[in-house]
Image (cartoon, rainbow, N blue to C red):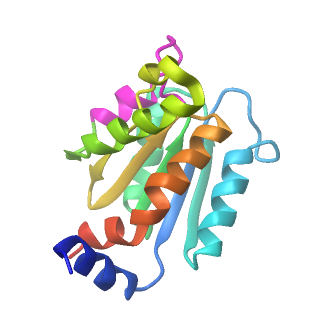
């Protein structure tokens, strides 16, 4: 058994993981936030807990304020969706990147590689990222429902327990 497999085995025996969800959008409401509804259902299906939800505008001060609040919470993973593009309103990546203490470049690289099948060369415009801030795993994906599903199914869910364990072991 590889060390990665051993770590995943140990991580799977830990308590359920508390996960916070942050949707960054200028147009969604809690009722129309399909990403929150999808993610909360998936988190609970795996036996984990949603430990916070915020719906904010794509304003750097709001992104950072929520990050700091959630970094002081029980959440071990903080999932942002939205604000990762290159338009002038897309500032989530910039705000989060300035705060991350460690980065996980592989997350963004793998996400863009997997996105190729969905959006082709437009995948290069995603500034999806991940890293660690105050012993919390922070993951930021585009806000499109297909992107959120792709990130959850292919990258986050398979490593969720492992990620949560690694930052506290």
For the N terminus, the image quarter is: bottom left
Up the image or down, 73 lies above or below 15; here it is: above
For the C terminus, the image quarter is: bottom left
Residue 47: image x %, image y %? 58, 79
Residue 154: image x %, image y %? 49, 53
**With 111 as the anchor, is 2 left or right in this view?**
left
- 94 drawn magenta: yes
- Residue that appears at 46% across and 39% down: 114
Front-lying residue, 120 or 96? 120
Within the image, what quadrant is residue 162 found in?
bottom left
- Residue that appears at 52% across and 28% down: 83
**With 58 as the anchor, is 112 left or right in this view?**
left
Image: magenta residue range: 83-98
Within the image, what quadrant is residue 15 found in?
bottom left
Q: Which residue lies furthest to the right in this view?
A: 31
- 105 drawn magenta: no
Front-lying residue, 62 or 83? 83
Front-lying residue, 19 or 143? 143
Up the image or down, 37 lies above or below 140; here it is: below
Residue 100: image x %, image y %? 26, 43
Number of marks in picture: 0
Up the image or down, 59 lies above or below 169; here it is: above
Up the image or down, 27 lies above or below 37; here it is: above
Q: Residue furthest top?
A: 88
Residue 34: image x %, image y %? 74, 46
- Residue that appears at 74% across and 44% down: 33
- Residue that appears at 42% across and 21% down: 124
Which is the main secondary structure of the residues drawn in magenta?
loop
């Amino acid at each position: 058994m590889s060390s990665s497999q051993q770590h995943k085995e140990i991580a799977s025996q830990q308590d359920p993981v508390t996960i916070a969800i942050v949707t960054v959008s200028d147009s969604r409401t809690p009722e129309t936030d399909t990403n929150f509804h999808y993610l909360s259902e998936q988190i609970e299906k795996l036996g984990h807990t949603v430990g916070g939800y915020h719906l904010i505008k794509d304003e750097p001060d709001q992104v950072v304020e929520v990050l700091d609040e959630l970094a002081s919470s029980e959440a071990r993973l903080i999932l942002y969706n939205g604000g990762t593009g290159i338009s002038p309103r897309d500032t989530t990546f910039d705000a989060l990147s300035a705060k991350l203490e460690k980065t996980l470049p592989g997350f963004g690289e793998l996400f863009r590689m997997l996105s190729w099948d969905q959006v082709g060369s437009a995948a290069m415009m995603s500034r999806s990222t991940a890293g660690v801030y105050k012993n919390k795993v922070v993951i930021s994906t585009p806000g499109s429902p297909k992107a959120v599903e792709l990130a959850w199914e292919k990258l986050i869910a398979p490593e969720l327990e492992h990620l949560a364990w690694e930052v506290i072991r």
